[in-house]
Structures are given as structure tokens and as C-alpha cells.
Image: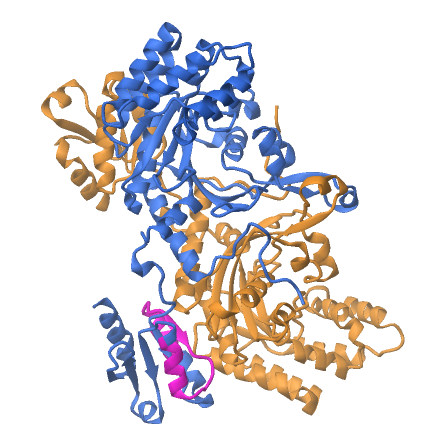
Chain colours: A orange, B blue
């Protein structure tokens, strides 16, 4: 006998799971539609060269690789790989279909991606991403619209407590350079600095000093981040962070600081108003970002609900000339996870499969049962037909266990009279209705 | 520079491609909902043992296999594989989640599958299937509902000329046994007999005789199929085929013949009425079918638009005890292909990405543009914001090229007056509207 579990780190989605996901996806689509984003889909499988080398050392190891066909199969050679994110395929699509796409191509894409990570609570090897990306403009309007759309989605889903952490790749680089930290240590030092509010000053100081060895003093960057950490969390915070940055960097960091200041101002007249929080420790792992970077935080989740940023050079690696781009990815599984924990789904989402169950009086009435079901369905009613001539009580019990509100019975008397008995299992009442009136009868009562 | 094409045999779906697909999927879902089917999704990736050996020799070769992680990667060992159809994963799910599922579990599943076939016109390595399956009953009501639901979908999509070819695995076996053809040759002989109306009697006779060698005379089966082929294509045909079968098989074939007769009668009171055509040469490749088998044909397509049948033993291979089941799969790509060839899509399906484009007066008006877009979007209007302060004429031209009907302009005068100029690019008319009234103004004109 075969194993029946899904592959490690992957999940089966039973009907109510799918319904919950579709509830979220419907809202995501609706919002993205309103922002002028268009749907795009790419294959689950890409040529291996399209993906390998895009996601850093660590990412390379997490790409699922597919064996080459035919005689090569035994050699272990892989020529294909599973999609790892939705951004690299988009860059490939933009390069491939340039002529067919508008100058400012804005697309959304809601598809699964696969990563061979060690499975853990809330971390899966197959998971959906919901990405928006805007191609073709360097304007900060684009970043502002990304923050606006993501905020709009989360607000419409019922999130009241999310924050968009905002930083800038050029600011990060300027800050660390100013502190005398060599380029090669930027990433690892940032990882440590980002832990400041979790593990405390002493631990971070030791870790940073260790990373930098005796060559570079870590005092300057530590002092800066301690000052930032001590700023009040109120509405004045962003301006104070900008002030600290200006003081620390002087002229050398003015470009990214000014961009962040503008972006804060632009988002203030969108649904992202009050959500954006400057966070100079935000780094985001992926190597392709070149400008502003964003990440969404909620208090009760260690990871983020999504994130994104500007990446002006990625498309160029496919196309041979750069096209500016900026994107934002919502993590659907994380959103679902938090929504379930917090019971944020409307009751109606996990629904019954039918409005009416047509019972089967006996084996001779199969044709009549199907005819009744057909007429109800053409009127838009959702109908389950009980497939076997079990005792009526058993059939009623089944409908009840499935949460189906109405059952129909056509016994010999009803058949002779051209009528149908309709029982409302919620109230227990039963009425006899003319054959032609059943759909209308049920629809009216369902609408109540 | 990287290659930019999708992997061989796979496709990128640009916005209008996705919109066409979603149009079809929406109708498929709506119909399946009305039949009481519930949504299910399974992972794209399965343990390799779940799939290998399920689809015959030929199928095994077409399964995409995924390299095992870590130190095994170099060895070429594969432990995972890409989903090859939606039926085997369903059987696994039913065995795994038995306790959580209703006695009569009816699910639909609309997801891609992957097969390493040689790509050809209309044949891809990644394609969507839309499956319905009903688990838990041996009643022919189930088969009838499958035919009804598939017919309902196709009719609602606008197909007027499809036929459901119907046969029965037990009838096939009885027929070939009766003709003295050994079990081992059944499949190959059927392949030849199925070509009778395409390549003619002589070619088929030679091929069948060659297959059977000198041991078994092929005259009897040839004669039967020639008689069947000569039957009139009118509404009396099904009864005549049943008569031929009864005469040829006698008592030995009465069970499947009676089932087919009943099924014809049941489908007559559903949307499949007049669609079902008995076809004793229909074999269907997959090895797991045990009862009735169906396949949808349209005149201008060599392959089928979908097919299915009863498979009462498959779930048992996962569960250890048999659970009856019957399913039907619609081939989404084939449906889309034929619909495109025949221009069956409503014009509105390939749509514009926005109702209104908010132009940008100058760099200083970015905030105002975003505020206007925000207010329009919260009223449900789809808004594109032009991200750069290009000349107004260029911005208008862009909106026009994108098929966006309205553009808004907020120049210095409008800003001072708290108004917005709204231009209808279709008529060329322009009106000045109070800021607060723009959403209403546009919505009313869009509804016209």
C-alpha cells in the first residue's frame, strides 16, 4: 500500500482551506485591479540558468532542480527548475515580450513558488506569493503606489495594526561606508544590528565587534543604532530618523535620505498614510534591490507579511539594457496564517457545498431526480443529488450533516400531482410546491 | 546575457491570455458549484512513489522528476515528481483525509499538470486540467451527473456541436474476449479499430491481422466494427448500437450493456440530453478505469476536449480497501484553443487595465495625483496613475493607447478651484467636475 501524505513541507487544501484562500485572493485581485495592475502568469518550471545565481548562495541551494529527460536522466543532470519567486520570471517576461507590453507595465501575479527550506510551523516548501510590480519608471510615485496597494489589501482584509518598514539600499550602503565598515561585511553586520531590539545592546555589540575584528571600530555604527532605537515610537519618529541620518551622513547620504523623505510625503495621501515607518536596519535578503526597500510587519508574527523594493538592474541582465522596476510581494500563507490565528474570516467563507439536496425516492425515480436537479441548477441554485435510494431518514441526516438547508422529496403522491415536497432542515417546516415553482420557492427563502 | 524564453513546451500568459483563461475558469467553477462539487487543491509536487507506475509505461517516461536535496543531488536520485494528472493526487487525498471528508465527496480541482511530451501545436508540457470527481457511490447517477456537468459547462461557454462518446471498460473486454482476442492484445487492437473511419477498412484489417498473427482470426471483430460504422448517425443510432452489442455478446455482456442503456436514459433528463453517443471503439488510455468511460469530441479538433470514467479500484491502492469513484476532466487548453480559433470570447474579456488615468501636471503635483487616485479607488474605480510629469499630450496618448476611456487633469486653475477636468477620450469631450464628485461622474458614464 502506498503512502498517502503529501510531500514533505507541502499541503493538501481541503474545500474550506481553498475557500479561505480564495476569499483572500479575491480581495487581493480586486484591489490590484483598482490600481491598474494586470494579471500575468508564468510557468512553474523555468530553464535552470534563468534561476540559478539569482538568489545568492543560500537561495541557490533551495532551488528544486528537475532532471533532464531521456538518456541524461541517469546522469543526474538538471536542465529545469521550479519557480523560486515571481520577480525573476517577470524580468524574463519583460525582456522576452518587450514589444507587446506597454511602456509602464504594471502586473500582478498570484502563483505558487517552491523552496527546499526546512519545513517549520508556518513555513512551507510550496507557497503562494501575490506580487505587484511596476516596470518602466524611476518615479517615486511607483514606490508610493506599491505601499498604497499593499496597505489597501491589508486594510480590506481587516488588518488594523500593520506597519510598512521602509529603508533604502543606497542609505544602508552610505551608512555602513561612513562608519568605516568594508563592503564585504555590510550584510552580516546588518543582520546583527537588526536584532538590537530583540537581544539587547551587549549581545549585538559583541557580535558586531567579532564580525569586524580589530580592524574597524564598531562604536560609531553601534552608537547610531542605539540612538535610533531610543527614538520615540510616535508620529514624530520618521522626521527624527531623517534628522539622525542627515547628521550622520552629511552630504554623502543626501540623495537616498531625500528620496525617503519624499516617499513618506507621497504615501501620506494614500491608504498607506500613517503606516510607513523608517527603519534604517531593514536590509532584505535578496541581492537585486537597488533603491527603496519595504517590509510589512505585524506585532504577532516574527517574519513579515510581505515586502519589496526597487530593482533597476535585474531586467537588464536579461535584456542587455536596464529598465527600472519596483515590486511588492504579499506572502499569502503568512496572511492566511495570521487571519486564522486571529479569526478574521467572515463566517460565510467556510461554506456549504449546496443549497438544496434532491433526495432519491427509489431506484425508479432517478430520472425524475436528475430532471428536478437540472431545472433548479438552470435557475442558479446549487444542488446536491443524493445518489442512492437509501432510507429517507438517512438521506435527510446526510443533508443535515453537510449543512445543506433544503431537501426535496418526490414520492408517489407528489409525482402524481406534479409537485415537490420541500423541507427546510433549519426550521423543520415542510411545504408542497408545484414542480415549476421549486427554484423560485427555494431562491426566495435563501435570500432571506 | 540570459535567455529570455520560457522553458520548452511551456508558455507565459500575458494579461489578455490570463483574462481569457479566467473567463473560462469562472464559468467552469460556477457550473461545478451548482452541481455541489467543492474546491480542492493539492501540491504541484508529489512523492515520486505516488506517481510512478500509475500511468502505464508511456506515462512513466513523461513524469518530470525532481532531484533529491543535499548530498544526494550529485547522484541523480529523484525523490519527488511533478503532478501528472489530478486523479491520482485525489485518490491519495481521499485515503489521507478520509475522516474529514463526507461519504459522497464531490470535488472540483483546477490546477496545472506537467508532462514531458514532445511539444506540438496545441500540446504543451504544462497545462491546466479542470477535474470533477465523485467519491463513494457506485450509482449510475454519478456518471449521469458527470456528463450533465461537463455538458453544462460547454453549453454555457457557447459550444453547440460537441458529443460525449460513451463506452464501458467491461463491454470492451467482453467484446474482444468474445472475438477470441487474447487480453494482451486488447489495447493495441482497439487502437487500430478506433481508426476505422479515418484510414479505411483495408488498412485497419491489415493492421489487426498483423497484430493477431495467424493464431486468431480477426474477421469477427472486423465485421462487428464495420456493422457499427455503417449505422446511421441519427437519433436511433444508440439503440441500434445497443442491439448490435446484445446480439454479439449474448448473456456474457449483458451487465455493461444494461448499464450503458440506463446511463443513456438518465442523461436524457440533464443538459447532456442529445449529446451522448455510444462508441464501442472508445478505449481511453489510462489503466485505472473500471466502468463507464467518456470522452468529449468536437468536429474541428483531432483530440478530445475532455474525458473521464469510473475507477473503483484506484483509491484502494492507497487506502487498502476500495472506494468507488468516477471522474471527468476538461482540458482547459484545448477548450481555450478551440474557443480562440472560433472567436467565441465576448469582446469585453480582453479588457483595459483601468477606467481612468490620472495625469501628472508637474513634479509638485504628485501628492495631489495620488490623493485623487485614492479617492477614486475607494469608490471602486480602476485607476492608473501616470508616474512621470511628461507633456500632457504624451500622457493622453498613452492613456489612449492603453484603451483607458477617461483621463483627469488637475492644473493650477483646477487646483485653486478644487476641481478636476475629466476628459472622455472616446468622445473628446471635457468637463470640469468638483473634486468630491469625480468618482460619481466617472462611474455613471462607465455604466452607460
Number of callouts: 0
> Is residue B372 visible in this depiction of the protein?
yes
**What residue is rendered at 23% in x and 28% in y?**
B269
Instruction: Name the one closer to the observer, A385 or B225.
Output: B225
Counting from the top left corner in percent of width and height, residue A134 is at 51, 71
Q: Is residue A237 left or right of residue A391?
A: right
Task: Determine whether A392 is above or below B338 in the image.
Answer: above
B191 left or right of A365? Answer: right
Residue B384 inside the magenta-drawn segment: yes
Return the x and y of residue B36 as percentages of the image width and height.
34, 36
Residue B313 visible in the current orientation: no
Measuring 39% from the left and 61% from the top, which residue is drawn there?
A: A30
Q: Residue at x 31, y 22 (%)?
A: B230
User: What residue do we see at 66% from left, 84% from top?
Assistant: A245
Q: Position of residue B370 (x, y in %)?
A: 42, 79
The extreme front residue here reads B202
- Residue B379, percent from left and from top: 32, 69
Q: Is residue B399 above or below residue B1?
A: below
Residue situated furthest left in the rendering: A417
Q: Quadrant of residue A170?
A: bottom right
Quadrant the N terminus of chain A occupies: top right
Q: Is residue B160 above or below residue A60?
A: above
- Residues shaded magenta: B371-400
Instruction: Check if residue A399 falls in the magenta segment.
Output: no
Q: Nearer the viewer, residue B176 or A35?
A: B176
Amino acid at each position: 500500500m502506498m503512502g498517502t501524505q503529501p510531500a514533505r513541507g507541502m499541503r493538501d487544501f481541503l474545500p474550506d482551506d481553498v475557500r479561505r484562500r480564495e476569499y483572500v485572493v479575491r480581495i487581493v485581485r480586486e484591489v490590484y485591479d483598482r490600481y491598474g495592475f494586470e494579471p500575468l502568469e508564468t510557468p512553474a518550471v523555468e530553464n535552470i540558468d534563468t534561476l540559478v545565481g539569482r538568489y545568492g548562495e543560500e537561495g541557490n541551494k533551495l532551488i528544486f532542480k528537475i532532471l533532464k529527460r531521456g538518456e541524461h536522466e541517469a546522469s543526474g543532470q538538471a536542465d529545469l527548475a521550479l519557480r523560486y519567486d515571481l520577480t525573476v520570471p517577470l524580468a524574463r517576461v519583460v525582456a522576452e515580450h518587450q514589444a507587446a507590453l506597454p511602456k509602464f507595465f504594471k502586473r500582478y501575479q498570484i502563483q505558487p513558488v517552491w523552496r527546499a527550506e526546512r519545513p517549520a510551523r508556518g513555513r512551507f516548501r510550496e507557497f503562494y506569493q501575490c506580487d505587484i510590480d511596476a516596470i518602466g519608471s524611476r518615479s517615486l510615485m511607483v514606490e508610493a503606489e506599491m505601499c498604497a496597494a499593499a496597505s489597501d489589501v491589508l486594510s480590506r482584509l481587516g488588518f488594523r495594526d500593520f506597519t510598512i518598514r521602509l529603508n533604502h539600499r543606497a542609505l544602508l550602503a552610505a551608512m555602513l561606508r561612513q562608519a568605516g565598515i568594508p563592503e564585504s561585511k555590510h550584510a552580516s553586520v546588518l543582520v546583527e544590528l537588526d536584532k538590537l531590539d530583540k537581544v539587547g545592546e551587549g549581545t549585538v555589540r559583541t557580535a558586531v565587534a567579532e564580525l569586524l575584528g580589530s580592524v574597524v571600530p564598531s562604536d560609531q555604527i553601534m552608537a547610531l543604532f542605539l540612538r535610533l532605537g531610543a527614538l520615540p515610537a510616535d508620529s514624530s519618529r520618521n522626521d527624527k530618523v531623517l534628522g539622525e541620518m542627515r547628521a550622520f551622513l552629511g552630504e554623502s547620504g543626501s540623495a537616498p535620505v531625500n528620496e525617503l523623505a519624499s516617499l513618506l510625503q507621497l504615501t501620506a495621501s494614500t491608504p498607506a498614510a500613517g503606516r510607513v515607518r523608517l527603519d534604517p536596519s531593514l536590509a532584505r535578503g535578496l541581492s537585486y534591490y537597488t533603491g527603496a526597500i519595504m517590509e510589512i510587519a505585524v506585532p504577532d508574527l516574527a517574519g513579515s507579511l510581505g515586502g519589496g523594493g526597487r530593482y533597476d538592474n535585474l531586467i537588464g541582465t536579461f535584456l542587455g539594457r536596464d529598465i527600472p522596476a519596483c515590486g511588492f510581494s504579499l506572502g499569502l500563507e503568512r496572511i492566511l496564517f495570521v487571519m486564522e490565528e486571529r479569526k478574521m474570516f467572515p463566517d460565510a467563507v467556510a461554506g456549504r457545498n449546496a443549497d438544496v439536496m434532491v433526495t432519491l425516492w427509489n431506484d425508479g425515480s432517478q430520472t425524475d431526480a436528475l430532471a428536478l436537479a437540472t431545472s433548479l441548477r438552470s435557475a442558479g441554485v446549487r444542488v446536491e443529488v443524493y445518489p442512492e435510494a437509501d432510507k429517507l431518514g438517512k438521506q435527510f441526516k446526510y443533508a443535515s450533516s453537510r449543512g445543506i438547508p433544503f431537501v426535496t422529496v418526490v414520492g408517489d403522491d407528489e409525482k402524481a400531482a406534479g409537485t415537490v415536497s420541500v423541507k427546510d432542515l433549519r426550521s423543520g417546516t415542510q411545504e408542497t410546491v408545484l414542480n415549476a415553482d421549486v427554484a423560485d420557492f427555494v431562491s426566495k427563502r435563501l435570500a432571506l
